[in-house]
């Protein structure tokens, strides 16, 4: 089912997985997806070479298995830096063969040797996908605190408007740790004529090291209330991870109460973390039993 149709019907709830790196078997990803599917998310998204990991060849097989074997809608990511139109045509053909309607169209993280060839920005990819015969439901990324490369707020919203005008159906946000940033962003979108549904992306942090890395790669700010939780958790990795999941659950419950269009958990191949967020939303009545 098309994700835009789900968003038109209800507040959605979704998870994300990334293909296993290196030589790890695909079965590992299938098993993780299977565990996550038990919580009946509206969709599971599968990343495409995120962070330059080079594992893009496994995105479609995993997404296909999610649709075919688990009966859950899959969202296949696709990045365009370093790609030619023919590469995109090939990917679209794979999606069609696998019966996947949903794609998240991205530029991709910059990495050495990954220069723009036929596409410089996500909006170029979206326009191209719209020009093909494929009738895809297309999502795009948005950034509640602005994209790290956008020098001004105006430019950030202009890029977003271009994605909308190119034919994106909805947006999925970068992670953020202060819901007020998301609420402000939602209001500003309307002022900048961006009217697409916006799915809020939440990452349960699992350690001090991980949250620091995310802050630098995504430009997400770490509020004092998160720092305090981590200080209280101390050096114990289990306590740090528990603090991260608890904080994410609180964020999700607040977002659900504030009527966001959808809730997306960057569950990072951790079914137990995904399940905990689901349980928190169920306990507050935001998801069916
Ligand atoms: P763009 O929309 O192209 O924006 C990039 C920068 O260029 C921004 O600063 C923007 O303001 C500017 N810009 C946009 N259009 C124009 C224009 N026409 N003229 C001038 N400037 C412009 N990365 C991966 O590699 N794989 C993944 O699977 C993946 N999944 C992601 C999922 C989500 C939900 C999010 C939020 C990010 C994901 N990323 C992934 C990271 C993403 O690729 C990076 O954030 C990347 O830096 C920007 O991608 P974009 O699609 O927003 O690019």
Image (tube, rainbow, N blue to C red):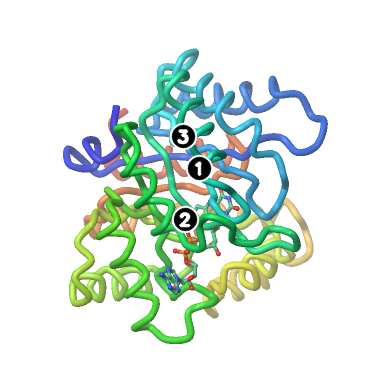
- Alpha-carbon distance for marks 2 and 1? 17 Å
Of 39 and 56, the residue lying toward us: 56
Of 161 and 40, the residue lying toward us: 161
Judged by depth in the image, the label closer to the viewer, 3 or 1, is: 1
Residue 31 x/y as whole percent: 63, 22
Q: Is residue 213 left or right of residue 244?
A: right
Residue 259 x/y as whole percent: 22, 55
Disc 2 residue crowd, few under 14, some 14–19, many 20+, Cα 10 Å:
many
**What residue is at 57 percent from the left and 38 percent from the top?**
17
Of 229 and 28, the residue lying toward us: 28
Residue bearing mark 2? 202
Residue 216 x/y as whole percent: 65, 73
Residue bearing mark 3? 44
Q: What element does badge 2 sit on?
A: strand
**Residue 243 visible to an observer of this rendering:** no
- Alpha-carbon distance for marks 3 and 2? 14 Å
Judged by depth in the image, the label closer to the viewer, 3 or 2, is: 3
Q: What element does badge 3 sit on?
A: strand
| Residue 142, above or below 32 | below
Q: What element does badge 1 sit on?
A: strand
Judged by depth in the image, the label closer to the viewer, 2 or 1, is: 1
**What residue is at 64 percent from the left and 68 percent from the top?**
217
- Image quadrant where residue 29 sits: top right
Ligand 1 lies under 8 Å from the Cβ of mark 1? yes
- Image quadrant where residue 184 sits: bottom left
| Residue 66, above or below 265 | above
Disc 1 residue crowd, few under 14, some 14–19, many 20+, Cα 10 Å:
many
**What residue is at 31 percent from the left and 48 percent from the top?**
262
Residue 128 x/y as whole percent: 38, 48
- Alpha-carbon distance for marks 3 and 1? 11 Å
Residue bearing mark 1? 77
């Amino acid at each position: 089912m098309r994700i835009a149709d789900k968003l038109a019907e209800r507040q959605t709830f979704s998870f994300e997985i990334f293909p296993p790196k290196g030589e790890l078997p695909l079965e590992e990803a299938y098993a993780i997806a299977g565990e996550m599917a038990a919580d009946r998310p509206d969709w599971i998204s599968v990343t495409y070479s995120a962070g330059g990991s080079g594992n893009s060849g496994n995105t479609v097989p995993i997404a296909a298995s999610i649709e075919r074997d688990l009966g859950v809608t899959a969202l296949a990511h696709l990045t365009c830096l370093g790609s030619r139109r023919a590469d995109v045509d090939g990917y679209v053909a794979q999606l069609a063969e696998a019966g996947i309607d949903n794609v998240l169209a991205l530029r991709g993280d910059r990495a050495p040797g990954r220069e723009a060839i036929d596409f410089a920005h996500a909006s170029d990819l979206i326009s191209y996908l719209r020009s093909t015969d494929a009738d895809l439901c297309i999502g795009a990324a948005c950034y509640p605190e602005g994209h790290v490369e956008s020098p001004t707020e105006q430019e950030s919203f202009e890029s977003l408007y271009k994605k909308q005008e190119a034919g994106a159906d909805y947006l999925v946000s970068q992670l953020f740790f202060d819901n007020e940033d998301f609420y402000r962003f939602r209001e500003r979108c309307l002022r900048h004529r961006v009217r697409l549904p916006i799915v809020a992306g939440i990452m349960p942090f699992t350690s001090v090291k991980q949250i620091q890395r995310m802050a630098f790669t995504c430009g997400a700010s770490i509020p004092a209330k998160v720092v305090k939780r981590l200080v209280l958790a101390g050096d114990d990795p289990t306590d740090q991870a528990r603090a991260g999941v608890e904080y994410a659950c609180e964020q999700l419950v607040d977002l659900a109460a504030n009527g966001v269009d959808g809730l997306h958990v960057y569950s990072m191949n951790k079914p137990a973390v995904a399940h905990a967020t689901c349980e928190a939303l169920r306990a507050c009545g935001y998801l069916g039993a």
